Image (spheres, rainbow, N blue to C red):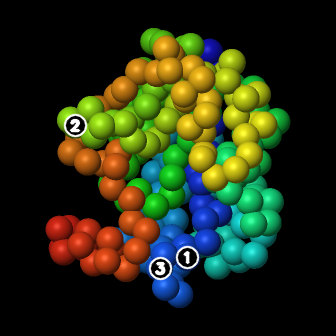
């Protein structure tokens, strides 16, 4: 089986951050995007999808072995996914860049499980079973991902193939914790004072 490619989605506009860029917020002394790209690279070949006008995000990736892919202007998450998977035929692991608790170990776990269930959609979940991210798609669904449009992400593909979905619980709420607003960041930092 071909090794998965990680598609790290980082093209969002951070509109709910009221002027700040959530992916450039510091985590352990580095921009969140850099931290997440490093984690992804530890697990598999990685493509980072950014907007064409996000040069600061691109600079945050300097020195990290990733391929940068550009999302279409003013397109939704689905178009970012389609841009990220274009030209790929093997499995892909779709990962959101604003989820700071997802670790390289979690990515390795999903990849290892995909070798045992090569036709399954492996969806990370919270410890209580609530579905979250990231999500690993088998090779047979990559063509569908490449045709996505709109802002629902990969939800249409997941729903169309619900019988293939297997939840993979991660520790705590790692699969659900995303930071979209200054308040999200403040709460998360208060709960993680050493980061």
Are the residues at dot 2 and dot 1 in contact (C-beta closer than 8 Å)? Answer: no
Which label lies toward us, 2 or 3?
3
The answer to whether the residues at label 3 and label 1 have Cβ atoms under 8 Å apart is: yes
Residue in view at x 20 percent, y 68 percent = 192
Structural crowding at the residue carrying mark 2, measured as other residues with C-alpha within 10 Å and reported as few (<14), some (14–19) or many (≥20): some
**Disc 3 and disc 1: Cα gap in Å?**
5 Å
Q: Is residue 170 above or below residue 177?
A: above
Secondary element at image label 1: helix
- Say what secondary structure mark 2 lies in: loop
| Residue placed under numbered mark 3 in the picture | 17
- Real-space Cα distance between discs 2 and 3? 28 Å
- The quarter of the displayed image where residue 157 is located: top right
Q: Residue at x 75, y 75 (%)?
A: 53
Look at the image and tell me whether residue 154 can be seen.
yes
Q: Residue 100: where, in percent of width, then height?
A: 38, 59
The quadrant the C terminus occupies is bottom left
Q: Tell me where residue 27 appears, x and y as whole percent.
A: 37, 71
Q: Which mark is residue 127?
A: 2
**Residue 5, position in %: x, y?**
63, 36
The residue carrying mark 1 is 15
The residue under the point 54% across, 14% down is: 118
Q: Quadrant of residue 183?
A: bottom left
For the residues labelled 2 and 1, the Cα–Cα distance comes to 30 Å
In which quadrant is the N terminus drawn? top right
């Amino acid at each position: 089986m071909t090794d998965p490619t990680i598609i790290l989605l980082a093209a969002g506009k951070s509109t709910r951050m009221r002027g700040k860029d959530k992916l450039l917020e510091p985590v352990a002394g580095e921009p969140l995007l850099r931290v997440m790209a490093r984690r992804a690279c530890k697990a598999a070949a990685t493509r980072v999808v950014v907007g064409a006008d996000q040069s600061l995000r691109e600079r945050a990736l300097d020195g990290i072995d990733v391929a940068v892919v550009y999302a279409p202007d003013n397109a939704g998450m689905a178009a970012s996914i389609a841009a990220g998977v274009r030209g790929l035929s093997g499995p892909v692991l779709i990962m959101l860049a604003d989820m700071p608790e997802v670790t390289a170990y979690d990515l390795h776990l999903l990849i290892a499980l995909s070798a045992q269930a090569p036709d399954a959609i492996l969806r990370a979940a919270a410890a209580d079973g609530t579905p979250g991210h990231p999500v690993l798609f088998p090779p047979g669904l990559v063509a569908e991902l490449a045709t996505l449009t709109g802002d629902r992400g990969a939800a249409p593909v997941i729903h169309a193939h619900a019988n293939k979905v297997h939840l993979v619980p991660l520790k705590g709420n790692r699969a659900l914790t995303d930071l979209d607003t200054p308040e999200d960041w403040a709460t998360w930092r208060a709960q993680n004072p050493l980061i």
